[in-house]
Image: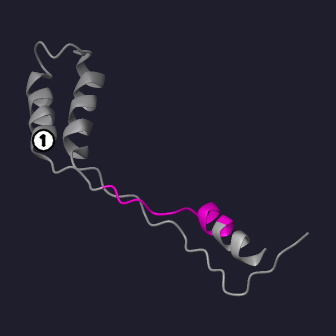
Amino acid sequence: MTIHIKKLKVRPKKAAQTTMCAPELTSMLACWAATGDTFNHNACQESAKNLFQCMRTAPMPKKIHKPTINFHLARLGKSIQ
């Protein structure tokens, strides 16, 4: 059984948000790759401190619940029957 819904529109997903501390994380990972200092004892200590400081001060993104297409189809299916 196929149901045709006239006014059903599906919007494409929005682009992903930029990561707040991406430059600091990239800097620390690059330092780890270059020096092998994964415990942040010497060379990468400053990069790690910068990343931790950024993570402490970066605002948390607000999560807004957006119903999925399955929710809307189920809701329409109930009204059609």
How far from the left and from the top, in percent, is residue 4?
80, 80
Given the image, on which type of amino acid does mark 1 rest?
A: Cys
Is 49 rendered above or below residue 77? above
Picture quadrant where residue 47 is located: top left
- The colour scheme of the drawn protein is one colour
Q: What is the tally of numbered marks visible in this picture?
A: 1
Q: Between 18 and 65, which is closer to the camera in this rendering?
A: 65
User: Residue beneath label 1, please?
Assistant: 54
Q: Which residues are magenta?
A: 63-74
**Residue at horizontal 16 percent and vertical 39 percent from the top:** 55
Q: Is residue 10 magenta?
A: no
Q: Secondary structure at mark 1?
A: helix
Left or right position of 52 against 26: left
Q: Quadrant of the N terminus?
A: bottom right
How far from the left and from the top, in percent, is residue 3?
83, 75
Picture quadrant where residue 17 is located: bottom left
**Residue at horizontal 67 percent and vertical 65 percent from the top:** 74
**Residue at horizontal 62 percent and vertical 80 percent from the top:** 9
Q: Between 10 and 72, which is closer to the camera in this rendering?
A: 72
Q: Quadrant of the C terminus?
A: bottom right
Q: Is residue 66 magenta?
A: yes
Residue occupying the far right of the picture? 1
How far from the left and from the top, in percent, is residue 40?
16, 17
Is 6 rendered above or below residue 3? below
Q: Between 46 and 3, which is closer to the camera in this rendering?
A: 3
Is 56 rendered above or below residue 77? above
**Residue at horizontal 21 percent and vertical 45 percent from the top:** 21
